Image (spheres, grey):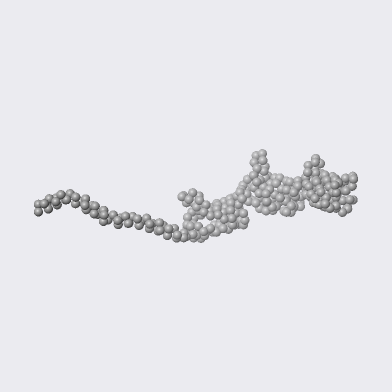
Amino acid sequence: MAIATGIARQFRPLRPALIAALALVLFAPAAVALDTQAPAQMPQAAAQAAAQPQATTTLTMSASAVGDPGLIRHGLQWRVFAATPDAGAREVAESPEANPTFNLPAGDYVVHAALGLASGSKRIRIDGTPLTEQVSINAGGLMVNAAIGDVPIPSAKISLTVYIPAPGNSEDKLVTSSLKAGELLLLPEGTYHIVSNYGDTNSIMRADIAVKVGKVVTATMMHRAATVTLKLVHKTGGEAVADTGWTILTPGGDVIREAIGAFPSVTLAEGNYIAIARHDGRVYQGEFEVRSGIDHDVEVTAKDTPAAVAQ
């Protein structure tokens, strides 16, 4: 009995440590199992949440110029930017259509519409209700025509180029080289340099035109030119000789135009010219005058003494 009591007293200090060790063995696996299962479940839940489609609302846009209620039907480029602080002006949609429809989640957006150099923007809030909005393009209008005296020049015979001028360079920045006569061009407010070419030679007119927001400026480029038809003939009033090569020169010798044919037509600025005809290895020439608005034939006679008759 005394021996048993002594043994018990010797193991008494070890009892708390033994209990702790048994607890570690019995309960540690369950704790580890819980820790290993939790991370495996979290990505699955996140993936399921991400798979849920985000509700969107339709936003239909249109644009018009300031001071003009008519809608712009072509040439627009739309961009939509998220306007939340954490988005960093991130572009979320774009369209080249005249009246695009965007499907957007709820939130704040900035819609930007560009038409060449002119543009406009609008801040829009999407809250679940379909919207139809309109942007005003901050621009003025420019319309250019051409004429000789009181006679309008057909659009097909005129090429118009628009530039933004700079000091010392009237053609510093090209705006467009495809403007048609009578076509409305929307531009930001400013001064523009217009180059009008009648035909494809030297009948060129230039002008600086100021454009103001909300107003349409109409300009008429007044040309002084005419169209001549060249003929190489054996006698005055005779039949034109085929397969003739032509060169038109100024009195100073500058080449204005070259052509091949029995009777090529050339539009020239008012002034004096020299026509040189080449046929069968021989060269003939004659002088002629162009008067504004008077279209006529120019005959070069194929004989040893060159001559030209204007009819």
The quadrant in which the N terminus is found is: bottom left
**Residue in front for this viewpoint, 306 or 14:** 14
Left or right, 95 with reference to 128: right
Asked which quadrant contains residue 25, the reply is bottom left
Residue 134's place in the image compared with 211, above or below, is below
How many numbered dots are placed on residues in this image? 0
Residue 260 point in image, percent of width and height = 80, 50
Residue 101, by quadrant, is bottom right
* Residue farthest left in this picture: 1
Q: Position of residue 296 (x, y in %)?
A: 83, 51
Please indicate, yes or no, whether residue 136 appears anywhere in the rendered image: no
Residue at the spot 68% in from the left edge and 48% down from the top edge: 161
Instruction: Provide residue 139's location: percent of width, then percent of height.
Output: 61, 50
| Residue 134 vs residue 251, the one in the foreground | 251
Identified at 68% across, 46% down, the residue is 194
Q: Is residue 164 left or right of residue 242?
A: left
